[in-house]
C-alpha cells in the first residue's frame, strides 16, 4: 500500500492496535485522548507486536472503497469513510498507525493513506486526516507576504536597498498581524454551527469545519482577513482632507458601508496598553 509520512510536529499515538472501519463519527462527545503515559506504553507494545499481514490490510482497504462506492450509488450523495490499520514497511523499526480515507462522489473515487503518530488517531481518525489535509494553510502566510505585500519587489541593484525594502515589507506584515489580534472577534461556537456539543476545531468533521471557517470569515472579516481585505475596506477609501493651521480633518462618507470596521479598529488601537503583570 502507499502512504505518506506525517509532519515532524506530530506526537506519539496511543491505541490498542485493533483494526476496524471508522465511518463518519456520530456527533457526540469524543472520548478523552490517551495520556502521555498511555502513549508511551502503547509505543513500547507496538514495537513488540508484529504488524498485520500486508494482504490483510489490502483486503480491508479494498472492502472500504467498495462499501463507500455502493453507498454512493444507493444514495446519490458524496460518501467518505475511514479505516485505521497498522502498517510496517521494511525499513521501519515498528508498525505505525495508518489512516486510510476512501470517498466516492460525482467525480469518481478517491483513496488516500496518511501515516501518523497523532495521539487522537484511534479516537478521531477523520479529524487527523482533515488536519493533515489543511497543512498547506500555513503556506498562505508566505503567499501573503510575497504577493499581497509585494515582498518580492527587490529590483534595486544594491544589496542594502533591497534589504531595507524587505525590512519594510516584513514590518508591514507584523503590523497587520498586530492589528488582527487587536480586533479579532470570538470564534463561532458549536451552537452557531448547529452541533449538539462543544468540540475543538480539530475534532469538527469536514463539512462542519468548512461552515466553521465560512462563518468565522463572515462574522469577523478583519480578524482573519488577508492584506487585500484590509486594503479594500480600510485603506482605499474615498475621503475629503481638510488642512487647518492646527489640525488635519479627514471627512468620510456617512454612507460608507465599512464604517463600522473603521470605528472598531480606531477604538482598538486608541485604547491604552494593558500593563504587564509584575508576577
Image (spheres, rainbow, N blue to C red):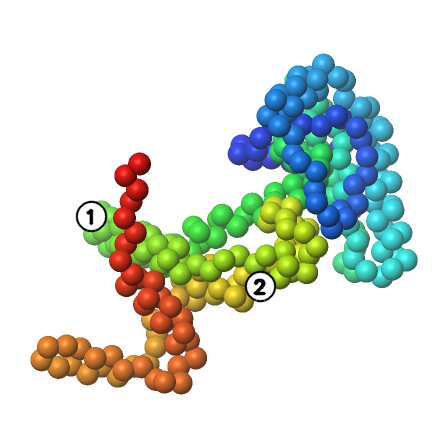
In front: label 2 or label 1: 2
Q: Which residue is drawn at 58% across and 62% down?
A: 214
On residue 13, which mark appears?
none
Whether residue 103 can be seen here: no
Location of residue 58 with respect to 68 vertically, above or below? above
Q: Where is residue 161 in the image (x, y as percent from the top left)?
A: 21, 52
- Look at 83% across and 45% down and name the residue there: 65
Most foreground residue, 274 or 49: 274
| Disc 2 + disc 1, Cβ < 8 Å | no
Secondary element at tag 2: helix
Q: Is residue 57 left or right of residue 34?
A: right
Tell me which residue sits at (78%, 57%) in the image: 78
Q: Where residue 188 appears, x then y in whole percent?
A: 57, 59
Mark 1 lies on a secondary structure that is: helix
Give residue 180's position: percent from left, percent from top. 40, 58
Reading the image, the residue beneath label 2 is: 215
Residue 207: percent from the left, percent from the top? 68, 57
- Find residue 263 and report its image quarter: bottom left
Task: Locate the C terminus by quadrant.
Answer: top left
* Circle 1 residues within 10 Å: few <14, some 14–19, many ≥20: few
Bin the neighbour count of mark 2 within 10 Å (Cα to Cα): few under 14, some 14-19, many 20 and up: some
How many numbered circles does the render carry?
2
Res. 107 image quadrant: bottom right
Residue furthest to the top in view is 48
Residue drawn 85% across the image and 51% down it: 69
Find disc 1 in the rendering and name its residue.
Answer: 160
Amino acid at each position: 500500500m502507499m502512504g505518506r509520512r506525517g509532519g515532524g510536529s506530530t506526537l506519539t499515538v496511543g491505541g490498542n492496535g485493533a483494526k476496524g472501519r471508522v465511518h463518519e463519527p456520530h456527533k457526540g462527545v469524543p472520548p478523552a485522548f490517551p495520556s502521555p503515559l498511555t502513549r508511551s506504553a502503547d509505543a513500547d507494545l507496538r514495537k513488540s507486536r508484529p504488524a498485520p499481514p500486508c494482504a490483510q490490510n489490502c483486503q480491508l482497504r479494498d472492502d472500504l472503497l467498495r462499501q463507500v462506492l455502493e453507498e454512493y450509488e444507493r444514495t446519490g450523495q458524496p460518501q467518505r469513510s475511514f479505516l485505521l490499520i497498522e502498517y510496517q514497511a521494511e525499513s521501519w523499526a515498528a508498525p505505525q498507525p495508518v489512516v486510510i480515507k476512501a470517498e466516492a462522489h460525482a467525480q469518481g473515487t478517491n483513496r488516500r493513506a496518511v501515516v501518523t503518530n497523532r495521539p487522537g488517531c484511534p479516537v478521531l481518525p477523520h479529524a487527523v486526516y482533515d488536519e493533515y489535509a489543511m497543512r498547506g494553510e500555513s503556506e498562505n502566510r508566505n503567499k501573503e507576504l510575497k504577493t499581497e505585500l509585494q515582498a518580492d519587489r527587490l529590483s534595486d541593484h544594491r544589496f542594502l536597498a533591497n534589504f531595507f525594502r524587505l525590512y519594510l515589507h516584513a514590518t508591514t506584515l507584523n503590523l497587520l498581524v498586530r492589528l488582527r489580534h487587536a480586533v479579532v472577534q470570538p470564534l463561532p461556537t458549536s451552537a452557531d454551527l448547529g452541533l449538539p456539543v462543544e468540540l475543538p476545531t480539530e475534532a469538527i468533521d469536514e463539512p462542519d469545519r468548512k461552515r466553521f471557517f465560512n462563518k468565522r470569515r463572515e462574522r469577523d472579516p478583519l480578524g482573519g482577513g488577508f492584506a487585500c481585505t484590509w486594503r479594500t475596506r480600510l485603506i482605499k477609501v474615498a475621503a475629503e482632507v481638510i488642512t487647518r493651521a492646527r489640525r488635519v480633518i479627514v471627512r468620510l462618507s456617512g454612507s460608507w458601508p465599512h464604517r463600522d470596521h473603521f470605528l472598531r479598529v480606531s477604538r482598538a488601537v486608541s485604547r491604552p496598553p494593558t500593563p504587564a503583570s509584575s508576577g
